[in-house]
Image (tube, grey):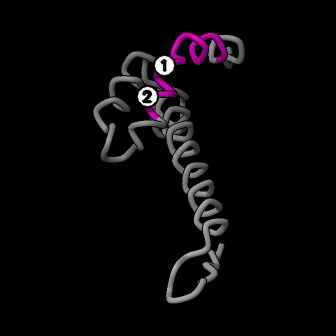
């Protein structure tokens, strides 16, 4: 996807464009957290699923480097909900 940034006056960025870019970047940061949790916590052909506590620990180790601290903190604050949802959709096969 290509982002277009409109320029106003002497090289200033239009606020609407900046807000859109910030929203798109935030969306990517949220997806990054969810995607890594899914990859760690589910069985793959090349690896077993990691225990949930280990998944959270791995992600906490990457706070501020791989993950946006604000996004990760919001995700980790909902651990019990995440575990509940994971148990609701567990693949028994």
Q: What quarter of the picture does the C terminus occupy?
A: top right
Residue 85 quadrant: top right
Mark 2–mark 1 Cα distance, whole angstroms, equals 6 Å
- Residue at 43 percent across and 28 percent down: it is 73
In x, y percent, where is residue 21?
A: 59, 63
Mark 2–mark 1 contact, CB under 8 Å? yes
In x, y percent, where is residue 68?
A: 41, 43
Total count of labels = 2
In front: 92, or 13? 13
User: Does 3 lie within the magenta span?
Assistant: no
- Say which element carries label 2: helix
Q: Which mark is residue 13?
A: none
The extreme front residue here reads 9
User: Does 74 lie within the magenta span?
Assistant: yes
Tell me: residue 13, above or below residue 89: below
Tell me: residue 56, above or below residue 31: above
Q: Which residue is mark 2?
A: 73
* Neighbour tally class for label 1: few under 14, some 14-19, many 20 plus, Cα within 10 Å: few
* Neighbour tally class for label 2: few under 14, some 14-19, many 20 plus, Cα within 10 Å: few
In x, y percent, where is residue 91?
A: 68, 19
- Residue at 54 percent across and 29 percent down: it is 43
- Say which element carries label 1: loop
Q: What quarter of the picture does the N terminus occupy?
A: bottom right
In magenta, the rendered stretch is 72-85
Tell me: residue 89, above or below residue 72: above
- Residue at 58 percent across and 44 percent down: it is 31
Q: Which residue is mark 1?
A: 77
Q: Is residue 1 left or right of residue 40?
A: right
Q: Would you say the magenta stretch is mainly helix, strand or loop?
A: helix
- Residue at 56 percent across and 42 percent down: it is 30
């Amino acid at each position: 996807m290509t982002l277009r940034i409109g320029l106003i006056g002497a090289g200033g960025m239009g606020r609407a464009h900046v807000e859109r870019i910030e929203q798109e970047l935030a969306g990517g940061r949220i997806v990054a957290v969810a995607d890594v949790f899914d990859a760690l916590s589910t069985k793959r052909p090349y690896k077993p699923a990691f225990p949930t506590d280990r998944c959270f620990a791995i992600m906490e180790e990457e706070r501020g480097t791989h993950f946006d601290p604000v996004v990760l903190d919001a995700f980790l604050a909902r651990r019990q909900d995440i575990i509940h949802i994971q148990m609701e959709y567990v693949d028994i096969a």
